[in-house]
Image: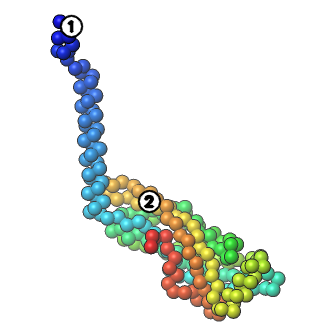
Amino acid sequence: MQQRKLLHRRTSPVIWFIAIICTIVAIAVIVTGLVVFIGYLIIRPRVPSISVTQAHMEKLGYHETGQMDTQISITIKAENDNAKAHATFSDLSLFLSFNGIKIAQLTAGPFDVPKNSSLDLPYFVQSSSIPLAPEGMEEVDASLKRNKISFDLKGDVRARWRVGVLGSVKFWGHMACQLHFFPSNGSSLNPPHCSSRSQ
């Protein structure tokens, strides 16, 4: 008799309620996943990027005492190739250095780039009395002889873009490249090939 009573015992309404809630949540998660996936396939968002579009060495002075003076103009372009996504850039921080010595830091506060658009950020680096180690002095001497001098440009930028139902997506972009100049006239190798976009 006890065994029959156990077999015919009804399921508690609380358990039914929990089961229904779990089923609804599972269906909502599946539907959301499908919407995000289909939206991604339709929109195909591209990662916003930064790149160097122009660089010119206005001045290069070198003294036998191991001091170097330089003035360099650099234009960084923030690009948003998405036709349906607005992008916001922030925490832009790039370091310009020579032979391991940091010359300047290029920064920018948060700024927006509209859909399928770009924004140019002009920088003018003016640095004087850069102390060079013996290795750096040798590098400058060799650069002047071959009429080619190189500077390193490294740093990061944070980007965020909103794509309709996909919501907001954040990520970091990294840049690490060299800018090559001709000391005779200050021009750079064109194009600079300096971008945070994956190659």
Question: Helix, strand or loop at disc 2?
Answer: strand
The circle drawn on residue 188 is: none
Which mark is in front, 2 or 1?
A: 1
User: Viewer-proximal residue, 58 or 66?
Assistant: 66
The residue drawn where x is 81% and y is 86% is 64
User: Viewer-proximal residue, 163 or 63?
Assistant: 63
Q: Decide which of tag 2 and tag 1 comes sooner along the chain.
A: 1
The residue drawn where x is 26% and y is 57% is 38
- Where is the C terminus found, in terms of image quarters? bottom left
User: In the current view of this chain or complex, which residue is farthest to the right?
Assistant: 65
The residue drawn where x is 32% and y is 57% is 164
Packing grade of label 1 (10 A; few <14, some 14-19, many >=20) is: few
User: Viewer-proximal residue, 39 or 124?
Assistant: 39
Instruction: Give percent across and percent down for residue 186.
Output: 62, 89
Q: Amino acid at mark 1?
A: Gln
Q: Could you tell me if residue 129 is visible in this image?
A: no
Q: Amino acid at mark 2?
A: Arg
Packing grade of label 2 (10 A; few <14, some 14-19, many >=20) is: some
Q: Give the residue pinned by disc 1.
A: 2
Does 187 appear above or below 28? below
- Where is the N terminus found, in terms of image quarters? top left
Q: Give the residue pinned by disc 2.
A: 160
Does 19 appear above or below 161? above
Instruction: Give percent across and percent down for residue 73.
Output: 60, 80
Q: CA distance from mark 2 to mark 1?
A: 64 Å
* Residue 4 in the figure: left or right of residue 178: left
